[in-house]
C-alpha cells in the first residue's frame, strides 16, 4: 500500500477441477481458486499482513515455509483456523530474496490438505537480487514450477496409493506442474529462470533436461548461492526449492525431466520409494526468434557463513520409525529450547532404511557436511530442508535471531508428509 506494507487475502476453499479436460472433475482444494494458490510477493523490509479465511469444511492452518518470523505467525499446528474463521498473522520480511512457499500444517492432516491442492509460492525480493542481471519477468522468463505427483481414479478423483513395501508415503503416477497435466512453456527469451518447488508429499525428484544439457543453479531454499553452480542433474526432496537458469536455442523443444533420484538407500528401498521412476516434467517450446538474455553471473552474493567453532550447543537428531530420537511428536511437549542469537550445530541422521528429509522452521541453516564429506555446490547456500539418505549424517550450523517466545514453539520434522503426520516431528522454543 505504498507504506512498505503488503496486505494479502487468502481464502482456503474446496474446489472442483477438470484436470484431464474431459469433463471428469476432481474434488480439490485451493487458496482463492480451485487448486494451489496465488504467488505472493514481498520485499525485504516490508511489513506483511495476511488474512487467511478458512472456508474448508475442516480446521486447517497455513505455514510460511522458509520464512523468518515470530512463532505465533508461523502457521504451524498451534495456529489452527477453524472453519469459517480468519487468521491474520503479521511480520516484517527480514531475509534475503528467495523462493519460499506456503501450505497447511494441521497436525496429522498435512498430507491430506496439501494433496488436495493447498499450497502456493511466496517470493521474496531484495536489492542485491535486483542488482544482478537475472531473468525476472514473472511468467515470461521467471517462472514458478510447482511439481506434484498425483494418482487419479478412473472417475477422476485423487487417490492416495501408499506402497505397502516402502513406507515412504504416497507416490503418484502422474505429474502436475502448477496444477496442469502435460504442461509446456512458450519461451521467448534465450534464457529462462525456473523456480522449482517440490511440493509433492513424498516423492524425491532428480531434475535434468532431456538432452542432458547443463543448467545454472542460482538459488536454493533460502536464496541466491554464493556462486552459480553448473549442473546437469539436481535432486530435490519434498519441500526443497531451487532456481535454475537454462539456455534455449531458437525453435527448439527441450523437456525438463526427472529420472530416478539417487536416494542413497538400498536397491529395494530405492525401487519402492520411487528411485527408478521417470517423468517428463515440463516441455520448453522456444520461439523462432528469442530476445537475448544477459549471461548468468558467476558470483552471486557473498557467502555469510556461521562459524561452527563458535557453536554453543551441538544437538543430535535421529530420524527413525515414527519419531525423532525415539519420540513421536506431541503438541504438549517442547523438545528443547534454543537461545536466541547463539550458533548451534545440529547433527541430523536418518538411522532408518527409508528415505527422510529434515526441515526446520524460522531459520535457514548452512550445511557443513553430508556423510562426513563437504557438501556439493547445490547445498552451498542457505537451506531450510535437506535430504537425509540412510546412515549419512548431515551436519548443519544454524542460528535463531530476532524473535523469541517461551510459549509458542517452532517445528522441525521430516517433510515427507506422511512421516510428519505420523509423528516424525518435534518442537522447540527460542528464548
Ligand atoms: Cu513446509 Cu513444517 O513445513
Ligand atoms: Cu516450514
Ligand atoms: Cu521421513
Image (cartoon, rainbow, N blue to C red):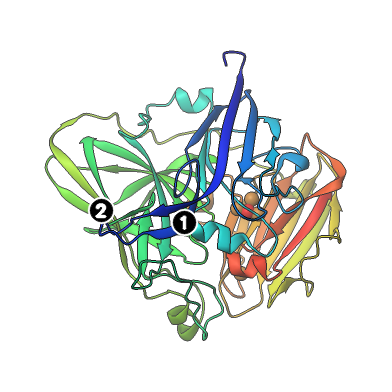
Q: How many marks?
A: 2
Of circles 1 and 2, the one toward us is: 1
Q: Which of the image's four quarters has the C terminus?
A: top right
Q: Which mark is residue 28?
A: 1
Q: Is residue 373 visible?
A: no
The answer to whether residue 259 is visible is yes
Secondary structure of the residue carrying tag 1 is: strand
| Residue 416 in picture, x, y percent from top left | 57, 65
Q: Are there few (<14), some (14-19), or many (20+) residues within 10 Å of tag 1?
A: many
Identify the residue at image location x=51%, y=31%: 41
Ligand 3, image quadrant it occupies = bottom right
Whole-percent x and y of residue 146? 42, 50
Label 1 CB less than 8 angstroms from ligand 1: no
Q: Residue 34 placed where, x, y %?
A: 44, 48
The residue at which mark 2 appears reads as 213
* Residue situated in front as seen by the camera: 201 or 83: 83
Tags 1 and 2 in contact by the CB under 8 Å rule?
no
Relative to residue 230, is residue 393 drawn left or right? Answer: right
In this rendering, position of residue 140 left or right of residue 16: left
Q: Is residue 160 above or below residue 86?
A: below
Q: Real-space Cα distance between discs 1 and 2?
A: 36 Å
Foreground residue, 160 or 290?
Answer: 160
For the residue pair 13 and 409, the one nearer the viewer reads as: 13
Image quadrant assignment for residue 316: bottom right
Image quadrant containing the N terminus: top right
- Asked whether mark 2 lies closer than 8 Å to ligand 1, one says no
Q: Secondary structure at mark 2?
A: loop
> Residue 102 falls in which quadrant of the image?
top right
Residue at 57% in and 33% down: 9
Q: Residue at x 28, y 52 (%)?
A: 183
Where does the image place residue 429, in percent across and percent down from the top left?
83, 49
Amino acid at each position: 500500500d505504498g507504506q512498505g506494507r503488503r496486505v494479502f487475502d487468502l481464502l482456503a476453499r474446496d474446489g472442483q477441477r477438470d484436470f484431464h479436460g474431459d469433463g471428469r472433475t476432481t474434488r480439490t482444494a485451493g487458496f482463492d481458486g480451485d487448486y494451489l494458490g496465488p504467488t505472493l510477493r514481498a520485499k525485504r523490509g516490508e511489513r506483511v499482513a495476511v488474512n487467511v479465511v478458512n472456508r474448508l469444511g475442516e480446521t486447517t492452518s497455513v505455514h510460511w515455509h522458509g520464512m523468518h518470523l515470530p512463532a505465533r505467525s508461523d502457521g504451524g499446528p498451534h495456529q489452527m483456523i477453524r472453519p469459517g474463521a480468519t487468521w491474520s498473522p503479521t511480520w516484517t520480511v527480514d531475509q534475503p530474496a528467495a523462493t519460499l512457499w506456503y501450505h497447511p500444517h494441521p497436525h496429522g492432516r498435512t498430507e491430506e490438505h496439501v494433496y488436495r491442492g493447498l499450497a502456493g509460492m511466496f517470493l521474496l525480493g531484495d536489492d542485491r537480487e535486483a542488482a544482478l542481471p537475472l531473468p525476472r519477468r514473472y511468467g515470461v522468463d521467471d517462472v514458478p514450477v510447482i511439481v506434484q505427483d498425483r494418482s487419479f481414479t478412473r472417475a477422476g478423483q485423487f487417490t492416495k496409493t501408499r506402497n505397502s513395501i516402502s513406507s515412504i508415503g504416497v507416490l503418484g503416477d502422474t505429474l502436475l506442474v502448477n496444477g496442469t497435466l502435460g504442461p509446456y512453456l512458450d519461451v521467448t527469451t534465450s534464457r529462462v529462470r525456473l523456480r522449482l518447488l517440490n511440493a509433492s508429499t513424498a516423492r524425491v525428484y532428480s531434475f535434468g533436461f532431456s538432452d542432458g544439457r547443463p543448467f545454472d543453479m542460482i538459488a536454493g531454499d533460502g536464496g541466491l548461492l554464493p556462486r552459480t553452480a553448473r549442473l546437469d542433474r539436481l535432486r530435490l526432496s519434498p519441500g526443497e526449492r531451487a532456481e535454475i537458469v537454462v539456455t534455449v536455442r531458437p525453435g527448439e523443444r527441450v523437456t525438463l525431466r526427472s529420472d530416478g533420484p539417487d536416494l542413497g538407500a538400498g536397491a529395494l528401498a530405492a525401487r519402492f520409494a520411487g528411485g527408478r521412476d521417470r517423468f517428463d516434467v515440463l516441455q520448453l517450446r522456444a520461439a523462432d526468434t528469442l530476445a537475448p538474455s544477459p549471461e548468468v553471473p558467476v558470483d552471486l552474493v557473498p557467502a555469510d557463513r556461521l562459524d561452527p567453532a563458535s557453536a554453543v550447543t551441538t544437538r543430535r537428531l535421529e530420524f527413525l520409525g515414527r519419531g525423532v530420537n525415539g519420540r513421536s511428536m506431541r503438541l504438549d511437549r517442547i523438545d528443547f529450547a534454543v537461545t536466541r542469537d547463539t550458533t548451534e550445530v545440529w547433527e541430523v541422521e536418518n538411522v532408518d532404511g527409508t528415505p527422510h528429509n529434515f526441515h526446520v522452521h524460522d531459520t535457514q541453516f548452512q550445511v557443513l557436511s553430508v556423510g562426513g564429506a563437504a557438501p556439493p555446490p547445490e547445498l552451498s547456500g542457505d537451506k531450510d530442508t535437506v535430504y537425509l539418505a540412510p546412515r549419512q549424517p548431515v551436519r548443519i550450523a544454524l542460528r535463531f535471531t530476532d524473535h523469541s517466545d517461551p510459549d509458542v514453539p517452532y517445528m522441525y520434522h521430516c517433510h515427507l508428509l506422511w512421516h510428519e503426520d505420523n509423528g516424525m516431528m518435534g518442537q522447540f522454543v527460542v528464548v
